[in-house]
Image: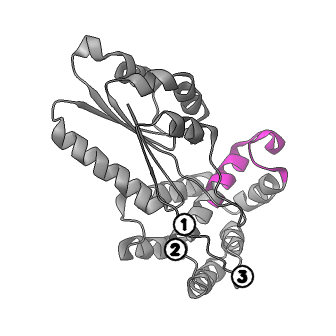
Amino acid sequence: MVYFFTGTDHARVYHTLSRYLAIMREKQPGATVLVFTADNFDQTTFEEALFGQSLFLNKHIVAARRLSENELAGKFVLENIEAIAKSPSAFLFYEPRDFAQGKPARENELAQALTKVAKDVKVFNQPVAVKPDFNIFTLTNDLGARDREHLWLDYHRAIRAKVEPLDVFWKLLWQVKSMIIASRAKDITKTELKPAVAARAARASRNFKPEELTAMLTELTTMYHETFLKSDDFNFRLEKFILSV
């Protein structure tokens, strides 16, 4: 059976999934718990959770986060969506929704399919915030230019303009990922990035060593998983990251 968690309020969505997972673990202490992300998805292990109950004689609790960001993972889940829905094991999926330039929230194909088959769907959305006084992409430009002083100053301008630190986090993470993709591509026109984005990211990536880009991605990913989003700890680590650029 499928439980689906989504929405633009990423913090509430993620922590609701975590609460459900904890409750299921408490109710089924003998169940095998597996956690998949876009980075660690393993098809063989997922197949064992989906089809292997009769062999192992126990149910599974599977938490899967942002699998749509992994092309192979998303395709596998879509191809097996009916089997997942009918499985006696519990599958908890988290796929976020995002606002694009003030337009309605977007849903990817996997999120749409999960919504149709889920036993329970939890949606937590944030209201669209109009922030005319600050262009958040100024921060990605500062990061790409490796201009620590302006990045820090513009971060505080963003905060005064009521931009959420979490929104800043997603934009900085997007910029780092874009620079890594562009720096590793033999032909940036053949990446998943839009041409203008790829060109800017390629230029920006020259301001960093490959290991520095990897370290930044690691720090941002660790920050996301180790801190409570929208907490003072999260805000402190985000500003510390900005000052380390």
Q: CA distance from mark 2 to mark 1?
A: 6 Å
Q: Which mark is residue 169?
A: 1
Is 83 displayed left or right of 156 in the figure? Answer: left
Residue bearing the label numbered 3? 132
Residue bearing the label numbered 2? 165
Q: Amino acid at mark 2?
A: Pro
**SS of the residue under disc 2:** helix
- Label 1 environment density (alpha carbons within 10 Å; few <14, some 14–19, many ≥20): many
Q: Main secondary structure of the magenta part?
A: helix
State which tag comes first along the sequence, 3 or 2.
3
Residue 65 percent location from the top left of the image: 45, 43
Tags 2 and 1 in contact by the CB under 8 Å rule?
yes
Is 95 displayed left or right of 85 in the figure? Answer: right
Foreground residue among 216 and 7: 7
Is 55 displayed left or right of 245 in the figure? Answer: left
**SS of the residue under disc 1:** helix
Is 86 displayed left or right of 134 in the figure? Answer: left
Residue 70 percent location from the top left of the image: 57, 37
